[in-house]
Image: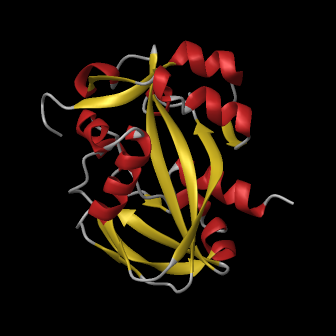
Amino acid sequence: MPADERVLVIPTSRFRAAGYFHGFRAADEAYLAALLDPAAFSFRPRREVETDPDFKQLIPYVVPRCGADLFHYRRGSSGTETRLAALRSVGIGGHVSEEDAAGGEDPYRTGMLRELAEEVEIGCRWVERLLGFINDDRTFVGSVHLGVVHLFELEAPAVRPREDALAEAGFAPLADLAARRDEFETWSQFVFDALTAR
């Protein structure tokens, strides 16, 4: 990461006022409006907010799905988040930077689409649905991040990694991946639970 990178955050106090939770929370209009309101956004130096629990970095977490199969990969050593290296994941995304604010009135969405395009190439049509939010304050990484889960329903299993950080990539049935949940980062485990909930 650039030493001077500034990333999108919201105050942790705003998150708590909207309704604190642990794990996964399904999206609803009120919660969405409270957390993704551009008026609440600010951009702060990443090197500072990575260790400051007074702020939550909003992280888009895009989950590509084709029928019953999810895209998955192993985080390679070349990724920027070394604390997650070697774990498996079903989510694609990363930090929204201050440069994304120059792309229009919604820096969060601009950053989400930029991160997606940097990490993978999707070779088919898709329909997007905002699935919900992920919070995990049990870990130091989780205490300063808030995941925003976007489910991309694909017409075909056509996703190709653009970065070495996405190793051993492919599609597999959700049930098979969930049965090996201990190999996956906690955010992916929360997604498994959300997608398999009755």
Image quarter (top left, top right, bottom left or bottom right) of the N terminus: top left
Side of 8 relative to 125 (left or right): left
Q: Is residue 30 left or right of residue 16?
A: right
* Colour style of the rendered protein structure: secondary structure
Picture layout, residue 168 above or below residue 31: below
Q: Is residue 22 visible?
A: no
Residue 127 x, y percent position in the rendering: 58, 70
Q: Position of residue 70 (x, y in %)?
A: 57, 73
Relative depth, front residue between 95 and 38: 38
Q: Is residue 32 visible?
A: yes
The residue located at (63%, 31%) in the rendering is 33
Q: Residue at x 24, y 66 (%)?
A: 163
Is residue 16 found left or right of 73 in the rendered image? Answer: right
Q: Vertically, is 89 above or below 177?
A: above
Asked where in the image residue 5 lies, by quadrant, the reply is top left
The C terminus appears in which quarter of the rendering? bottom right
Q: Position of residue 54 (x, y in %)?
A: 45, 13
Please tell me how many numbered marks the rendered image carries: 0
Name, please, the residue furthest toward the left: 3
Residue 73 versus residue 9: which sits nearer the camera?
Answer: 9
Please tell me which residue is depicted at 27% across the width and 19% down the height of the picture.
48
Residue at x 23%, y 67% (from the top left corner): 164
In the picture as drawn, the residue positioned furthest to the front comes out as 105
Q: Residue furthest right?
A: 198
Report the front residue among 183 and 18.
18
Where residue 132 appears, x then y in whole percent?
Answer: 65, 46
Image check: 125 left or right of 45? right
